[in-house]
Image (spheres, helix red, strand yellow):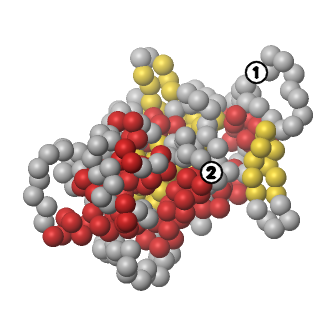
């Protein structure tokens, strides 16, 4: 980001306005491991300054999608651009919080030392810190809401606090894009709410683009602008209003799902209370059927029809091009 993040004591600047500039672009992207296709025909872009959930069933390839964006796993077909550059070529502008952070990091170091690893390439030991480095660490702790926890050891902190330390470590290098893999997992309700508040602040105050892998999107719904959903082996992107559809979510998760809207306008999802027959199978659909579950932006249908002529399967699973917010 071009501007320096203020410390916790600084009055926040006016939130920047989101635009249609893509933070990530997938073009006919496919990924395979051991001869097995994890997902294919990824054709979508995610606008800059948005908060995006990455959802799907276990094994659908949600974490794989983040790995692709970081350039840590090669594509079997197509290409991905992140921040306008080939994936993996600009990781110094990406903050990443892996799912295993809380268990992998040395619990005897302090929060301040942990965040400092984000400046030293995760090499622990004696590193002379400049006044600027110390200020960056302090700012990152403040942005994560734990400025007063700097001297605490990770072993003295709750799971929610440790997740905030992980986010502060990802923020210390001043990234434009923040990737989080299951950050709400294993947190109690208060911890989840606190973490969502942090993400909301990062997005609304600093305009940071955020992607969150999540199984349950209920807690994230107030801050989500869109979702990448992995349906029938293909990743799609849509604004969150289009994703909050009972039929789509039922087919996505292979179990009946209801989308509930309160009189106040709030929405949440829950499993349908109606008992399902034994031995049910996960719903499977052709790319054409999957595409019908979401709205395509103007021109996407024409692009899909044009691209289809070059493939054996005449129906491209393209979900969307650039979405306007």
Task: Kindly identify the residue that appears in the image at 18 percent across and 44 percent down.
Answer: 123
Report helix, strand or loop for mark 1. loop
Q: Residue furthest front?
A: 156
Image coordinates for residue 57, horizontal then vertical, percent: 62, 32
Dividing the picture into quarters, in which one does residue 52 lie? bottom right
Task: Kindly identify the residue that appears in the image at 40 percent across and 62 percent down.
Answer: 146
Residue that carries the numbered disc 2 in the rendered image: 189
Q: Which mark is residue 188?
A: none
Task: Kindly identify the residue that appears in the image at 33 percent across and 41 percent down.
Answer: 107
Gap between marks 1 and 2, in whole Å? 32 Å
Quadrant of the image containing the N terminus: bottom left
Q: Nearer the viewer, residue 303 or 96?
A: 96
Q: Residue furthest right?
A: 274
Residue that carries the numbered disc 1 in the rendered image: 281
Does residue 307 appear in this view? no
Q: Nearer the viewer, residue 281 or 32?
A: 281
Report helix, strand or loop for mark 2. helix
Image coordinates for residue 154, horizontal then vertical, percent: 35, 47
Task: Kindly identify the residue that appears in the image at 11 percent across and 50 percent down.
Answer: 126
Which callout, 1 or 2, points at the residue further toward the start of the chain?
2
Image coordinates for residue 20, horizontal then vertical, percent: 51, 66
């Amino acid at each position: 980001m071009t501007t320096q993040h203020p410390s916790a004591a600084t009055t926040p600047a006016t939130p920047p306005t989101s635009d249609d500039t893509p933070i990530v672009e997938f073009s006919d992207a496919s990924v395979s491991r051991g001869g097995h296709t994890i997902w294919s025909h990824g054709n979508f872009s995610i606008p800059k300054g948005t908060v995006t959930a990455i959802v799907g069933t276990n094994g659908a390839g949600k974490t794989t999608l983040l790995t692709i964006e970081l350039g840590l796993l090669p594509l079997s077909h197509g290409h991905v651009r992140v921040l306008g550059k080939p994936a993996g070529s600009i990781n110094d502008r990406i903050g990443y919080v892996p799912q295993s952070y809380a268990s992998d990091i040395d619990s005897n170091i302090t929060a301040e030392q942990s965040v400092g690893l984000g400046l030293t390439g995760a090499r622990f030991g004696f590193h002379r810190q400049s006044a600027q480095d110390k200020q960056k660490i302090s700012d990152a702790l403040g942005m994560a809401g734990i400025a007063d926890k700097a001297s605490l050891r990770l072993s003295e902190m709750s799971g929610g606090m440790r997740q905030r330390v992980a986010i502060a470590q990802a923020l210390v290098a001043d990234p434009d894009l923040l990737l989080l893999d299951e950050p709400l997992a294993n947190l109690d309700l208060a911890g989840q709410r606190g973490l969502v508040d942090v993400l909301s602040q990062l997005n609304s105050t600093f305009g940071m683009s955020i992607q969150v892998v999540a199984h349950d999107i209920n807690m994230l719904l107030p801050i989500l602008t869109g979702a990448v959903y992995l349906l029938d082996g293909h990743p799609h992107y849509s604004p969150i209003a289009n994703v909050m559809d009972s039929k789509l979510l039922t087919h996505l998760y292979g179990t009946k799902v209801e989308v509930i809207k309160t009189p106040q306008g709030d929405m949440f999802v829950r499993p349908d209370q109606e008992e399902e027959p034994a031995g049910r199978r996960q719903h499977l659909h052709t790319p054409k059927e999957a595409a019908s579950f979401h709205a395509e932006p103007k021109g996407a249908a024409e692009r899909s029809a044009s691209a289809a002529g070059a493939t054996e399967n005449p129906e491209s699973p393209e979900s969307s091009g650039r979405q306007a917010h």
